[in-house]
Structures are given as C-alpha cells and as structure tokens.
Image (tube, helix red, strand yellow):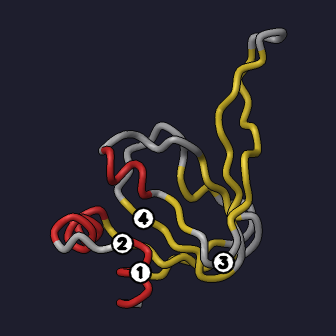
Amino acid sequence: MTLEEYCANKVIVEQGSPGDKFYYVLKGKVQIYIKAFNAMTGSEFHKHAADLPPGAHFGELSLIYNCPRTASVVSGEGCKLVVVSKHSYNILVRKYHVDHLNAILRFY
C-alpha cells in the first residue's frame, strides 16, 4: 500500500482507463463524474454523480471485473488516499476471501 496526496481539482482516475488500483479516502474528499451525452447539442460532458468523504473507497469495480474505469474521479479539495495495487488487492481479497475494506484498514 502507498499513500497518494492530491491538491484540489486533480484527476485521479479517468473513465474508460484501465483499472490498476483501489483507493480509500483517508482525508479530504473526491468527486465522481460520469460521461453523459446531450442529445440536443450532440456533445458529451461530465455529469457530477457523487462526492466521497473520508472513509469512502473507489476503484474496486475495475479490479473485480477486470474492466475499464466506470467513472472519473477528481480531488474536490486536497486529499490523501490509501492506494492498493491490483496485485495486492487480488491477494487480499481473492486469495484470502476477505472484505476489501476491512483488509485495507487492518493493514494500514
């Protein structure tokens, strides 16, 4: 596990990119955005879907289902994130069949 720090308004994860990490919000908050399409203008835009506070997590869907990121994540303010690589996540969750969040908190 590592600790990553981001200042405000930095892209952490981009929708459609390969997923190689799981994130736990230790401090600050992050904002979730999903690509949407405006049929009237024919343009694509990012729709704000949610804010995640400390204690929340994201990134597990790409690791579990081996699929691209389903949303973009941006630091809403300065934040600190505990980051677990795909390899470590697979060992903790799949090999030992433990709840991913409890495993991370126990080892951090």
In the displayed orientation, state which residue is furthest to the left.
95
Q: Earlier in the sequence, mark 4 or mark 2?
A: 4
Residue 39 tag number:
none
Residue at the spot of label 4: 22
**Crowdedness of circle 3 by 10 Å Cα count: few (<14), some, many (20+)?**
some
**Residue 81, position in %: x, y?**
54, 76
Q: CA distance from mark 4 to mark 3?
A: 15 Å
Q: Are marks 1 and 3 in contact (CB under 8 Å)?
A: no
Q: Are marks 4 and 3 in contact (CB under 8 Å)?
A: no
Q: CA distance from mark 3 to mark 2?
A: 18 Å
Q: Amino acid at mark 1?
A: Asn
51 sits to left or right of 67: right
Can you tell which quarter of the image residue 34 is in?
Answer: top right
**Residue 6, position in %: x, y?**
63, 72
Residue at the spot of label 2: 99
Residue at the spot of label 1: 102
Q: Amino acid at mark 4?
A: Phe
Residue at the spot of label 3: 54
Q: Amino acid at mark 2?
A: Asp
